[in-house]
Image (spheres, grey):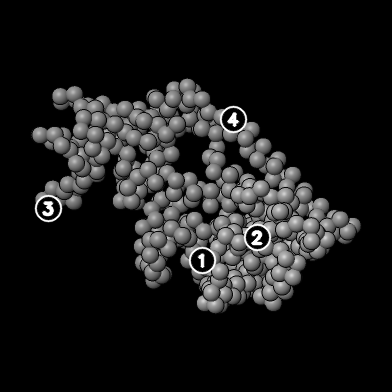
């Protein structure tokens, strides 16, 4: 008895299977990539050994034997004529299964037809993906579908652009959504707004269903620098509750009471028939009895600025941080090397080393690798933390900022502001993000 295995891999849709998937002791494995030369070799070998021993052929699915139902049927007839026992490991076909009824055969045939039709559609989408053509479906708001790429919609793109600018200015997703409705009458949900902020399309890239990204395929509405800042704001806001992330006050979401371990919220108090308001920080869920008292917001803010000016340079100097500039240069060198590979491909096609389809597939894979490196590069902070520690440790720097600007810098450095109470007094301890 001889056991052989055959697998067909469409390079546009999948990668080659591991040789260990069969779970049998296989004498020989035939593998095809994009064509079926090995299948023809398999049939020839079976014909020459037909009378010498029994041959068992393992396949994953019957559809791997041909590109159509007719082709699969012809291969099955050939194998039956040669006396080869066929076992489909992922289907109810094989020596160890029960005999197939007529209903089972009809069901299997229908499944085979559906699978071939689905594969044909996916191959068409894969060809478009390799050529960096836009995926099927609705065009994202702000663009129109052109001949081979997205085209900026001049009437809608400014709305998208202002949405991003508002988020970069205030760091509030819900506030940016409300801003669009108020100024342009454009109503979108918060989830839609978040999809806009994270979508590669507005950055000039295409995202396909398989999760792969191709960079620089069309005109961008948001620059790379703005997109990197959006990503950093979103990552930073994940540490905060949605309400605190969009709160106007700079300390919102950062202050905690060390005694009751409760987050503290900013409350406003106004005097009767007076326009002046007073701001306080009070615990949200204090379990103590009596509860921890509220503290004046301005005093907490003033002492927070004082503490950050004193503690930040010391914390930065004592922190062990990697050389980000060196890491960036390494990533840029990898991107340059892959870009050089892309530039060599046309010459390889002209010289006959590669055919057009192989070159397009290689170019696609290299471009996805460049996109991944570009995304990695965008996650780095734009400046060295040690280089700006001295600047932000000057009290006047913080006093000259607006509340929105101060909120931005606070959240850039501070994870928590902890307030420890001592009878009638209290003091602040900062927990930095590094």
User: Which residue lies under the disc numbered 1?
Assistant: 158
Label 2: how many Cα within 10 Å (few below 14, some 14–19, many 20+):
many
Which badge, 4 or 3, comes first in the chain's sequence?
Answer: 3
Q: Nearer the viewer, mark 4 or mark 2?
A: 2
At numbered mark 2, what does the secondary structure look like: helix, strand or loop? strand
For marks 1 and 4, give the CA distance.
38 Å
Q: Is residue 2 visible?
A: yes
Earlier-in-chain disc, 1 versus 3:
1
Q: What label does residue 59 carry, if any?
A: 2
Asked whether, in this view, residue 28 is left or right of residue 175, the answer is right
Foreground mark, 2 or 1, reads 2
Badge 3: few (under 14), some or many (20 or more) residues near its Cα, within 10 Å? few
Residue underneath mark 3: 273
Whichever of callouts 1 and 4 sits on the residue coming sooner in the sequence is 1
Q: Residue 284: percent from the left, percent from the top?
A: 21, 42
Label 1 and label 3: CA atoms lie apart by 43 Å
Quarter location, residue 51: bottom right
Of the two numbered discs 2 and 3 in the rendering, the one whose residue sits closer to the viewer: 2
Q: Nearer the viewer, residue 353 or 13?
A: 13
Q: Are marks 4 and 3 in contact (CB under 8 Å)?
A: no
Residue in view at x 67 percent, y 37 percent: 330
Towards the viewer: 321 or 23: 23
Residue at the spot of label 4: 323
- Which percent across, then down, holds residue 326? 64, 33
Instruction: Please name which of the two marks, 4 or 3, marks the residue nearer to the observer.
Output: 4
Q: In the rendered structure, which disc, 4 or 2, sits on the residue that comes first in sequence? A: 2
């Amino acid at each position: 008895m001889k056991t052989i295995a055959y697998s067909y891999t469409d390079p546009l849709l999948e990668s080659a299977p591991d040789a260990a998937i069969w779970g049998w002791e296989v004498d020989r494995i035939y593998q095809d990539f994009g064509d079926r030369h090995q299948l023809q070799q398999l049939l020839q070998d079976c014909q020459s050994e037909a009378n010498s021993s029994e041959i068992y052929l393992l396949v994953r699915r019957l559809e791997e034997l041909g590109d159509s139902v007719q082709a699969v049927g012809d291969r099955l007839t050939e194998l039956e004529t040669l006396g080869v026992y066929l076992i489909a490991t992922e289907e109810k076909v094989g020596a160890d299964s029960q005999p197939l009824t007529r209903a089972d055969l009809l069901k299997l045939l229908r499944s085979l037809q559906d699978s071939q039709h689905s594969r044909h559609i996916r191959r068409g989408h894969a060809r478009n993906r390799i050529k960096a053509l836009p995926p099927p479906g609705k065009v994202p708001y702000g663009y129109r579908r052109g001949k081979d790429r997205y085209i900026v919609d001049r009437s809608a793109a400014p709305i998208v652009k202002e949405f991003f600018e508002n988020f970069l200015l205030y760091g509030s997703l819900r506030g940016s959504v409300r801003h669009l409705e108020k100024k342009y009458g454009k109503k979108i949900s918060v989830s839609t707004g978040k999809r806009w902020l994270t979508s590669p399309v507005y950055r000039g890239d295409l995202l396909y269903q398989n999760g792969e990204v191709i960079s620089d395929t069309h005109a961008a509405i948001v620059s790379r620098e703005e997109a990197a800042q959006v990503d950093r704001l979103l990552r930073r806001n994940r540490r905060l509750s949605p309400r605190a992330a969009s709160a106007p006050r700079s300390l919102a979401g950062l202050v905690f009471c060390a005694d009751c371990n409760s987050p503290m919220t900013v409350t406003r108090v106004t005097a009767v028939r007076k326009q002046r308001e007073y701001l306080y920080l009070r615990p949200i869920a204090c379990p103590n009895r009596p509860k921890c008292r509220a503290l004046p917001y301005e005093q907490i803010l003033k002492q927070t600025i004082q503490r950050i000016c004193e503690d930040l340079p010391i914390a930065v100097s004592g922190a062990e941080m990697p050389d980000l500039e060196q890491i960036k240069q390494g990533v840029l060198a990898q991107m340059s090397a892959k870009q050089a590979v892309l530039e060599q491909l046309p010459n390889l096609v002209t010289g006959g080393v590669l055919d057009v389809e192989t070159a397009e597939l290689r170019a696609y894979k290299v471009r996805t690798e460049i996109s991944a490196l570009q995304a990695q590069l965008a996650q780095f902070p734009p400046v060295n933390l040690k280089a700006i520690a001295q600047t932000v440790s000057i009290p006047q720097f913080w006093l000259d900022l607006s509340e929105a600007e101060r909120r931005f810098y606070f959240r850039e450095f501070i994870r928590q502001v902890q307030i420890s109470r001592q009878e009638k007094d209290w003091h602040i301890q900062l927990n930095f993000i590094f």
